[in-house]
Amino acid sequence: MPKSTAPATKRATSKSVGAKAAPKASATRGAAARPAGSKRDGAADHAWDAIVIGGGHNGLTNAAYLAKAGLRTLVLERRHLVGGAAITEELRPGYWFTTFSYALSLLRPDIIHELELTRHGFMPILMPTTFCPMENGDYLLLGQDHGENHREIARHSRHDADAYDAFNHDVLKVCQAIKPLLDAAPPDIFSDDPEELVALAMLGSRFRRLDRKVLHDAVRLLTGSAADFLDDYFESDILKGYIASSSIIGTKVGPYSQGSGLVLLYHLMGEHDGEFGAWAFHKRGNGGFTQLLAKAAESFGVEIRLESPVESVITSGGRATGVALADGREFHAPIVVSALDPRRTFLELVDPRQLPTDLVDAITRFRFQGTSAKVNFALDGVPRYPALGDRTDQYRGFTNIGPSMEYLERAFDDAKYGAFSTRPYLDCAIQSQVDPDMAPPGKAVMSCFVQYAPYHLRESDWDTQRQPLGDTVQATLESFFPGFGDLVLQREVQTPLDIERTVGLSEGNIFAGEFLAPQMYFFRPAPGWSQYRTPIEGYYQCGSGTHPGGCVMGAPGKLAAERIIRDRGRAVAPDRANAVARDRQGAVARA
Amino acid sequence: MIRTTPFHERTAALNETGIWEHWSNHLVASRYQMSEKFEYFAIRNTAGLFDTSPLYKYRIHGPAAERFLAGVLARDIRTCPVGRGQYTAWCDDRGFVVEDGVILHVAPDEYLLTAAEPNLAYFQALIDGLDVAVDDVSADWGVLAVQGPRSRELLAALAPEVARLAYFDVIATKIAKVPVHVSRTGYTGDLGFEIWVPAADALAVWDAVWGVSRGRGVIPFGMTALYMARIEAGLVLLDVDFNSSRFAWTDADRTTPIELGLGWMFRDIGADDRTFLGHEAIRREIATTSSRWRLSGLILDWQDYDRIFDAAGLIPPKDHTPVQDEYYVYDDELNQLGYATSQMYSPILQRHIALARVPLDRTAPGSRVKLELGVSHRYEYFDAHVARLPLFNPERRTA
Ligand SMILES: Cc1cc2nc3c(=O)[nH]c(=O)nc-3n(C[C@H](O)[C@H](O)[C@H](O)COP(=O)(O)OP(=O)(O)OC[C@H]3O[C@@H](n4cnc5c(N)ncnc54)[C@H](O)[C@@H]3O)c2cc1C
């Protein structure tokens, strides 16, 4: 039994990275702030060129790019701190929890440079190890030395040791081929605009130039199962379990499901200092990252207002003209950007009756069904793994509790039938081992990403099942790390329902919409609407529900800003503006 | 037989790699962990321990110590009271750098000076009847560097007065009952300290520092992580970024302190009446701006870097391993302008950076140059811009 568990109701006294100590009715972030709610905000004086709804990392990225291009930009954030799913909170004095999101890899390098993040303290710390405990007490421990990794894998399978090199090489080639897609908006295949046709032709020719095997591998990954792909290379359960773990993150698939290959590839597409598939721990967690991102945005002139929940987008004559807050205040701007997920962007912030029916249908059908939870621990010390005695250096990266594909698939089985996993998959990280500032000396914080925890429980509800889930996770850890429970000082459980309530991600889906082929690229979030526009002029979308998708990546925010800035340029040139308008009418008519 | 440092018993136990290198005939760890980059992050995020004992160390003492040093060192030692230290250089009579080092004024008429190479005979030859002695005390002391944002609080737990040290202060204190000198100095460009401990007591001091470090993520770091940090900090290295004028064959291998970016040492030279070695040449160089080049930072253009590697079908490498070798710098027409002496990918700046000699008309920050690097077995010319040194300079370093 757990020694102590966190109360279900949380942290009246907790501090967050960057949160104001005592949230006032309307806290303002940034030096240039005016008192919120003053007359001027409400006046239709167009004090702003652009308003971004939601201060998650995509909203902040989007706003920073808009401000950098000269737009007076306002970010309205519902909560007392920015960051959305990427926040770090001091739940217990000296113990900092990455409440939700916990590692960094997909963040686009161009954003780091263009927003000058290093000036504000950007620090992605290397996580040099991956530790994979096994149910029989053995383990797989990978590190930074190629030869040592070879020997370690060979302990489990001599065959797999060099197959691992072949696998990495093949996957890297796919990543190299696919990567440019992450850094550009998808062409609009439904448009007759010559620019779009050119973009489409370039995309086609890019793929035609690819090596046949690379293209075939890409398609196998993008459409097939992780298990099929991995079985071609490996025989050892532990290695397959470790790699396949990346194929289920955030998605309601098991490693044997078609579609898990796409999730795997997505997670290997990130990079840390140029190394594909490598993850880093940002100083003070992803909340440390979003705080400095906010500072960068402010340095470009963005104003951020906290505790300012937007209720609706104000439109007039088919155009967005501003936003209305829950408390009745209004802010006006000719450009309004939703950094929320597609359901909120299209069905809640605006009246769906303003939108084409097939768009509304597509968004209604858009799959969220979050399946992930988070359990965070404050620990009295670092757990010991019996086979490694007193060693603790194995915890300098992820600890992967997913010892085989079968383990993962069985965990998925529970979710298929509406229950959380009795033996869940856990992606753990004792983050104080990488960034000692996360916990007091000698103590530890441990972040555990948990699957599967389906949003829709068949037999119960999450307010009832919150602590049972925490107990299950703790019992699982206890089975690998005997005595774990004795180390627990505090435990925080974040169910999919909590994620939805706290962050606003519908059904707690960590990516603002599942990574399924029909919800990606041309179709994210809906056919014909993958270019950050909406049918309402001046209303844009930039959240993780747009291309390329979720993760702390920033690409949606950046690509949407590029779209907005280009549209604005066109609006200035009347000929082009007419073309855009025709284009849009065409799109609306088709839609 | 290769020698070991006074800390060797402890460092040997911590070196998991078995990789050692030779530094002034001492065995030192290249890295302790499989990943030197992890050690580097300890320097930048927590604190790291570095055994810097193999430095040559000289004790300069006697009633004329200050007078002697005022004539030998290029930087004015008379502005360095007891309890202060200086990063300094010594030059030949033509104003070329012999070497650089850190001098600590530890007591009246008593200084400790570090150097990368032997300089005893050189200094002794300059005594010229003054009442001063120069002793080689290299083997008498172990020097332990504690570097990184947490270094101050770590050492303050052992010797509270360390917390009060300003940048380049030095004090005599005790750690683990052992009398030591602690200076706020280092070679990482971060907040940091160096502890001078009598060799015989080195292990006791190591153990005390290690004791307060436990559970705080403090780890020892080796030469590679040190080089990473020093390149970011724009700290020059003998036989890499410059050569000793004593042993150079031609003036092309000699450098003046001003060329090396140390012109700030002579900010008050107008009021400085010393006739130190090289002073005439240095005054002339300043008056006529006759420097041939200036050591500057280079930052490679990331888009150009990626483009060139993409075009070659390669994934653009971002390798933090310091390359301490010569690479040539060009203008747009591919006329050679100068050369880079150190380069690496900096994790904290997220850029490829270099230390390079560029002509005076290119020293303005933002000046464009091209750096020649091999890609896929041929030379390519990478866009870069000049930036002021140090490229990484956190406030905490001097605050
Ligand atoms: C538990 C969990 C673990 C994860 N782990 C990782 C990881 O390790 N690495 C990784 O890369 N990704 C991870 N992810 C995914 C990643 O964190 C998200 O995809 C990403 O942070 C989403 O960013 P966003 O800016 O698009 O949206 P969000 O972060 O959801 O931001 C939306 C913002 O809008 C605000 N908001 C909502 N409604 C309103 C309103 N009406 N008015 C004003 N503001 C409003 C919210 O408060 C929030 O701040 C994880 C996600 C979760 C939930």
Image: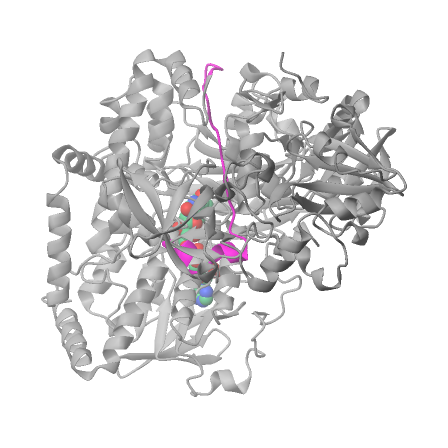
Classify the position of the C terminus of chain A by image quarter: bottom left
The boundaries of the magenta stretch are A110-138
Q: Position of residue A13 (x, y in %)?
A: 67, 54
Residue at position x 31%, y 39% in the image: B374
Residue at position x 20%, y 79% in the image: A577
B64 relative to B206, above or below: below
Q: Is residue A111 magenta?
A: yes
Q: Is residue B60 magenta?
A: no
A546 relative to A492, above or below: below
Number of numbered discs visible in the structure rendering = 0
A335 relative to A282, above or below: below
Front residue of this view, candidates B190 and A182 = B190
Q: For residue A536, which quarter of the picture?
A: bottom left
Q: Is residue A466 left or right of residue A491?
A: left
Q: Whereabouts is ligand 1, in terms of quadrant?
A: bottom left
Front residue of this view, candidates A169 and B124 = B124
User: Going by the picture, which residue comes out furthest to the front?
Assistant: B128
Question: Is residue A264 something that shows in the picture?
Answer: yes
Residue at position x 11%, y 61% in the image: A197
Question: Is residue A283 something that shows in the picture?
Answer: no
Q: Position of residue B389 (x, y in %)?
A: 55, 53
Q: Is residue A180 left or right of residue B34?
A: left
Residue at position x 56%, y 75% in the image: A32
Chosen colour scheme: one colour
B66 relative to A246, above or below: below
Q: For residue A208, which quarter of the picture?
A: top left
Q: Is residue A512 left or right of residue A357?
A: right
Q: Position of residue B285 (x, y in %)?
A: 59, 58
Classify the position of the N terminus of chain A by image quarter: top right
